[in-house]
Amino acid sequence: MSKIGVVMENIINECLGLPPNFLKEFNHDRSWDFMAALRYFPASNDENVGITEHEDGNCITFVLQDEVGGLQVLRNEEWIPVVPAEGTIVVNVGDVIQVLSNKKFKSATHKVVRKGEKSRYSFVFFHNLNGEKWVEPLPQFTKEIGEAPKYRGFLYKEYQQLRLRNKTHPPSRPEDQNFAAACLRVLEEDGPAAMTQATDCIKSRRYKYSIDAIHFYPIKTDVH
């Protein structure tokens, strides 16, 4: 999956008109990538939320969903169902690409709606960035074309910490509210403490990511 991530990164690189291999060299560390298996229970009579509206905070997300479906993306203020198709992978651009491109590429707003018939299963692969990497709008999309940066720069790991904190505490600054989707990074080596942190976030009222509606299974990071 990491190899597919690099291929998609190269496609985005070309679409943005960046120098060859720019994004590949910018994001060469694959140790932060991870995959998760998700199980969504059938909808109840009074609730069908799987995951509420959000954007992913990483670079690129790949979703392999079963025939049940339920994934929806927002376009022109309308929710569009992503109809499952055998042999296909759904690709979502994340916040990192949005910031680097100064919003030339928009992070995909999406949600999951649970259906009443049966559980939904999906595998999600997160093509991430090294936590020590500094992220800000690239000069190719700002000063070189006379446009002001739409975002201030940030350290990737601090940004993810901010996203997680915003699930359980009000943002310290109003402008942080826009990046308030939780990042549940649970790796095998993180152990019980990381799973406890993820569970606490899942239980947060702000995220409406019900522990009764979904099971989150971390998968070894060496799965490619």
Image: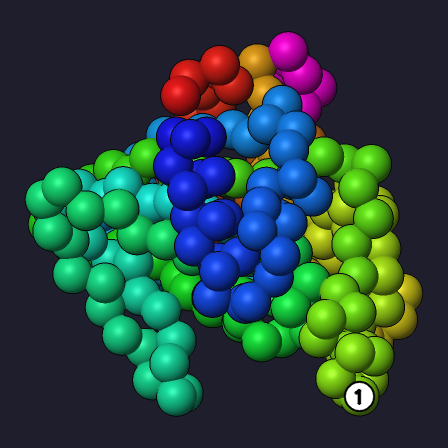
Q: Residue at x 41, y 42 (%)?
A: 7
Q: Is residue 214 above or below residue 159?
A: above
Residue 52 appears in the picture as rendered: no
Q: Nearer the viewer, residue 41 or 92?
A: 92
Callout 1: SS: loop
**Residue sitting nearer the eye, 219 or 192:** 219
> Residue 160: x and y, percent?
73, 46
Q: Residue at x 40, y 62 (%)?
A: 111
Which amino acid is tagged 1?
A: Gly
Q: Quadrant of residue 123?
A: top left
* Position in image of residue 151 (x %, y %): 79, 72
Magenta stretch, residue numbers: 189-196
Image mark count: 1
Q: Is residue 193 magenta?
A: yes
Answer left or right for 217 relative to 171. Answer: left
Question: Horizontal and vertical percent for residue 119?
Answer: 20, 41
Residue at far right of view: 172
Up the image or down, 96 lies above or below 31; here it is below
The residue where tag 1 is placed is: 146
